[in-house]
């Protein structure tokens, strides 16, 4: 089971099947905030979410546009996988 302490910190996406050309970072903090940064050819976008961990399920919500999303998360060593209904994103802790 993934524990909250395993998520805390900065993660760089190393494999994104949806946006493979983007440079993407996730920053999880202890207060339940997830800040995502997407660097694309057209500029940089920031998304601020809240999150909680329910077992191996990562539950996120975007307060400015409320919608709860769930994904299965697994952390092993310095690597994380986030599985959103079969679409798997791999991240490396930096």
Image (cartoon, rainbow, N blue to C red):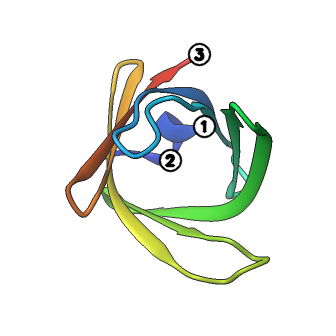
* Residue 15 in the image, given as x and y percentages of width and height: 37, 28
- Dot 3 or dot 2: first in sequence order is 2
Name the front one of labels 1 and 3. Answer: 3
Marks 1 and 2, how far apart at CA: 7 Å
93 above or below 60?
above
> In x, y percent, where is residue 34?
67, 51
Label 3: element kind: loop
Residue 87 at x, y percent in the picture:
27, 52
Left or right: 44, with 81 as reference point: right
> Which marked residue is nearer to the observer: mark 3 or mark 2?
3
Q: Residues within 10 Å of mark 2 (few under 14, many from 20)?
A: some
- Tell me the residue that label 1 is attached to: 8
* Residue appearing at x 20%, y 56% in the figure: 86
Please report contact status of discs 1 and 2: CB closer than 8 Å, yes or no.
Answer: yes
- Residue on which the image places disc 2: 4
Give whichever of 43, 55 is nearer the camera. 43
Image-based side of 46 in relation to 51, left or right: right
- The local secondary structure at tag 2 comes to helix
Q: CA distance from mark 1 to mark 3?
A: 11 Å
Check contact, mark 1 vs mark 3: CB within 8 A: no
Q: Position of residue 19 (x, y in %)?
A: 47, 41
How many numbered marks appear?
A: 3
Name the residue at 75% across, 76% down: 63
- Which sits earlier in the primary sequence, circle 1 or circle 3? 1
């Amino acid at each position: 089971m993934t524990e909250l302490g395993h998520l805390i910190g900065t993660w760089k996406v190393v494999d994104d099947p949806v946006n493979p050309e983007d440079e993407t970072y996730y920053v999880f903090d202890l207060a339940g905030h997830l800040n995502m940064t997407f660097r694309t050819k057209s500029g940089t976008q920031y998304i601020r979410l809240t999150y909680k961990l329910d077992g191996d399920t990562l539950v996120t919500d975007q307060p400015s546009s409320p919608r709860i999303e769930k994904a299965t998360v697994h952390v092993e060593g310095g690597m994380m996988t986030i599985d959103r209904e079969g679409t798997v994103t791999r991240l490396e802790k930096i």
